[in-house]
Image (cartoon, grey):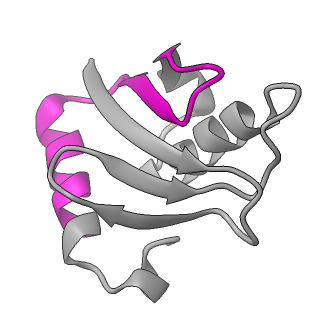
Amino acid sequence: MSRLLARVRPSARRSAIVRYDGELLHLDLAAPPTDNRANDELIRFLAETLGVARHRIRLIYGRGAKRKLLEVDVSPDVLREWLDRQKARPLQDRSE
């Protein structure tokens, strides 16, 4: 299990990774912050970009906040490698 700190901006035009600053993953989410829709989109988007099933990502805290702590059922090395790739990619490529 690995933990991931994220800062989200709901109601964006599309879901995308904005940047990773070495500590915090900044994301735009194409869902409003109502009825848990932004949290659902966060989990869906991360699962898709990480290549894991949605049930392997769990929101630990931050349900009603922009800052969130997530637990991801992958090894710390796999998550660190994925985050390093996000840091190195140009913005337009980060949603893949």
**Residue at horizontal 42 percent and vertical 25 percent from the top:** 70
Q: Furthest-right residue in view?
A: 35
Q: Compared to 62, does 14 lie above or below?
A: below
Where is residue 66 drawn, in percent x and y?
54, 36
Instruction: Examine the image and state in which quarter residue 21 appears.
Output: bottom left
Q: Quadrant of the N terminus?
A: top left
Left or right of 4? Residue 81 is left
Left or right of 63? Residue 33 is right
Where is residue 63 drawn, in percent x and y?
62, 19
Toward the viewer: 89 or 12? 12
Instruction: Examine the image and state in which quarter residue 5 appears.
Output: top left
Q: Compared to 35, does 79 lie above or below?
A: below
Left or right of 6? Residue 65 is right
Left or right of 26? Residue 8 is right
Q: Furthest-front residue in view?
A: 65
Q: How many marks?
A: 0
Q: Furthest-top residue in view?
A: 60
Q: Compared to 23, does 27 lie above or below?
A: below
Toward the viewer: 42 or 62? 62
**Residue at horizontal 43 percent and vertical 74 percent from the top:** 94
Where is residue 81 drawn, in percent x and y?
15, 53
Magenta includes 16? no
**Residue at horizontal 31 percent and vertical 32 percent from the top:** 4
What stretch of residues is rendered in magenta? 61-85
